[in-house]
C-alpha cells in the first residue's frame, strides 16, 4: 500500500545517509586527492563541512563558514 511505499523510501534514504556518513572520511580523502588539495585548503574548506542529509543523488551539507564558505566551495569544487 501507499504508506508502506513511503516508509520504504524513507528507510532507503536513511540507509543511504548512514552509508555516506560512515564513508564520509573516505569520501573527503578521495576529493582531496582528486583535486590535489593542499592541507591548508582541505582543512579550511572541506574538512569543516558537516553532512546533513542524503537521498537519491543529492547530499546536503552544513557549511559552518557561512556565505563566504559556500561561495568558495561552489567556485572551486562543484561539478
Image (cartoon, rainbow, N blue to C red):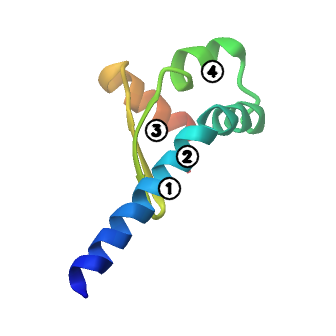
User: Mark 1 — residue?
Assistant: 16
Q: Nearer the viewer, residue 9 or 38?
A: 9
Question: In the image shown, does 76 or 42 lie closer to the viewer?
Answer: 42
1 or 3: mark nearer the eye: 1
Which of labels 1 and 4 is toward the front?
1
**Where is 9 relative to 28, above or below?**
below
User: Can residue 62 be seen?
Assistant: yes
Circle on res. 20:
2
Distance from label 1 to label 3 (Cα)? 23 Å
- Residue in the picture at 41% in, 54% down: 14
Disc 4 crowd, CA 10 A, few/some/many (<14, 14-19, 20+): some
Secondary structure at numbered mark 3:
helix
Label 2 SS: helix
Q: Secondary structure at mark 4?
A: helix
Counting from the top left corner in percent of width and height, residue 73 is at 48, 32
Corner quadrant of residue 64: top left
Residue lying farthest left? 3
User: Are the residues at dot 4 and dot 3 in contact (C-beta closer than 8 Å)?
Assistant: no
31 left or right, relative to 75: right
4 or 2: tag closer to the N-terminus: 2
Residue closer to the observer: 44 or 58? 58
Query: Which tag, 1 or 3, sits closer to the chain's start?
Result: 1
Q: Image check: 65 left or right of 79?
A: left
Say which residue label 4 marks: 42
The residue where tag 3 is placed is 74
Amino acid at each position: 500500500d501507499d504508506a508502506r511505499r513511503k516508509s520504504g523510501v524513507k528507510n532507503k534514504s536513511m540507509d543511504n545517509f548512514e552509508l555516506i556518513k560512515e564513508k564520509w572520511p573516505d569520501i573527503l580523502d578521495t576529493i582531496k586527492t582528486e583535486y590535489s588539495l593542499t592541507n591548508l585548503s582541505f582543512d579550511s574548506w572541506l574538512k569543516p563541512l558537516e553532512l546533513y542529509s542524503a537521498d537519491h543523488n543529492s547530499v546536503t551539507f552544513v557549511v559552518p563558514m557561512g556565505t563566504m564558505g559556500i561561495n568558495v566551495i561552489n567556485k572551486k569544487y562543484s561539478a
